[in-house]
Image (cartoon, grey):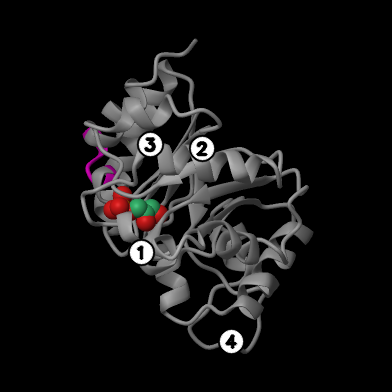
């Protein structure tokens, strides 16, 4: 099982230092596959038992791209994992062309990619979820060995109401017909729904926002999966 925390625009470097220290201690005793995506200003250098990733980057090594971070900056922190395609970034202007360029760049440089997809409520109501998701993944290499696909329906992000298990199961099953990549679910994952979500067929883990902001909450989520 994969547990990933997207801290979004939260945490300072000082608070993330404590977060990372506590998580490292926990993972020293409990081996799990864990990713954490802090804000870029909170990236830390160090030897972590979790995979440290970035929520955003620009597909360049370095150069005249005001306000952006390139590979050189990620390398400084040993970052080997990136989030691409999150609906919040799409809403802020990441279009298909940029998302594709990010994917191709990250693949070329062998990053682990958590690629996010998800439909809004209207698309779901119109029964167009599958064709919408198929379009979102049509330009990426679904056979890329370091790919993880995260299904995050927009209507469930930050609302406190996760998608229904049946809906999640149906989408994940559809995605298995397209890729062998591990599949995550994201959208209002918390301590109440984690067991049900992890028991969904084809679900290989979760991508957690709000509930993972407090390290003890994130650790409790991780603990709720009993290693088989
Ligand atoms: P929430 O867990 O706050 O709904 O956010 C999910 C998410 O967007 C993770 O990337």
Span highlighted in magenta in the image: 212-216
Q: Secondary structure at mark 1?
A: helix
Return the mark for residue 136: none
Q: Residue at x 35, y 64 (%)?
A: 121
How many numbered markers are drawn?
Answer: 4
Q: Residues within 10 Å of mark 4 (few under 14, many from 20)?
A: few
Query: Residue 154: horizontal and vertical position, in percent?
Result: 37, 61
Q: Is residue 170 above or below residue 152?
A: above
Give the left or right position of residue 68, taking residue 187 as reference. Answer: right
Which residue is identified by label 3? 165
> Who is closer to the viewer here, 189 or 54?
189
Residue at 48%, 20% (x, y): give it: 31
Label 3: which secondary element = helix
Viewer-nearest residue: 163 or 126: 126
Q: What residue sits right under mark 4 in the picture?
A: 65
Q: Nearer the viewer, mark 3 or mark 4?
A: 3
Single out the mark in the foreground, 2 or 3: 3
Dot 2 or dot 3: first in sequence order is 2
Label 2–label 3 contact, CB within 8 A: no
Q: Which of the numbered marks, if any, corresponds to residue 121?
A: 1
Going 38% across and 36% down the picture, which residue do you hit?
Answer: 165
């Amino acid at each position: 099982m994969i547990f990933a925390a997207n801290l979004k625009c939260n945490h300072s470097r000082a608070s993330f230092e404590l977060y990372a220290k506590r998580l490292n201690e926990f993972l020293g005793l409990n081996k799990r596959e864990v990713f954490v995506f802090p804000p870029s200003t909170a990236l830390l250098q160090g030897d972590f038992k979790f995979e440290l990733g970035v929520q955003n980057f620009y597909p360049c090594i370095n150069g005249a791209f005001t306000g952006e971070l390139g590979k050189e900056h990620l390398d400084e922190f040993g970052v080997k994992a990136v989030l691409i395609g999150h609906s919040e970034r799409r809403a802020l202007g990441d279009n298909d062309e940029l998302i594709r360029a990010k994917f191709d760049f990250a693949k070329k440089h062998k990053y682990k990619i958590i690629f996010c997809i998800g439909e809004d409520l209207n698309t779901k109501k119109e029964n167009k979820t599958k064709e919408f998701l198929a379009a979102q993944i049509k330009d990426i290499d679904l056979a890329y060995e370091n790919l993880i696909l995260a299904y995050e329906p927009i209507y469930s992000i930050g609302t406190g109401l996760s998608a229904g298990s049946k809906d999640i199961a149906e989408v994940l099953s559809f995605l298995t017909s397209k890729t062998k990549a591990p599949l995550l679910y994201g959208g209002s994952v918390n301590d109440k729904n984690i067991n049900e979500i992890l028991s969904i067929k084809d679900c290989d883990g979760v991508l957690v926002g709000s509930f993972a902001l407090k390290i003890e909450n994130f650790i409790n989520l991780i603990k709720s999966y009993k290693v088989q």
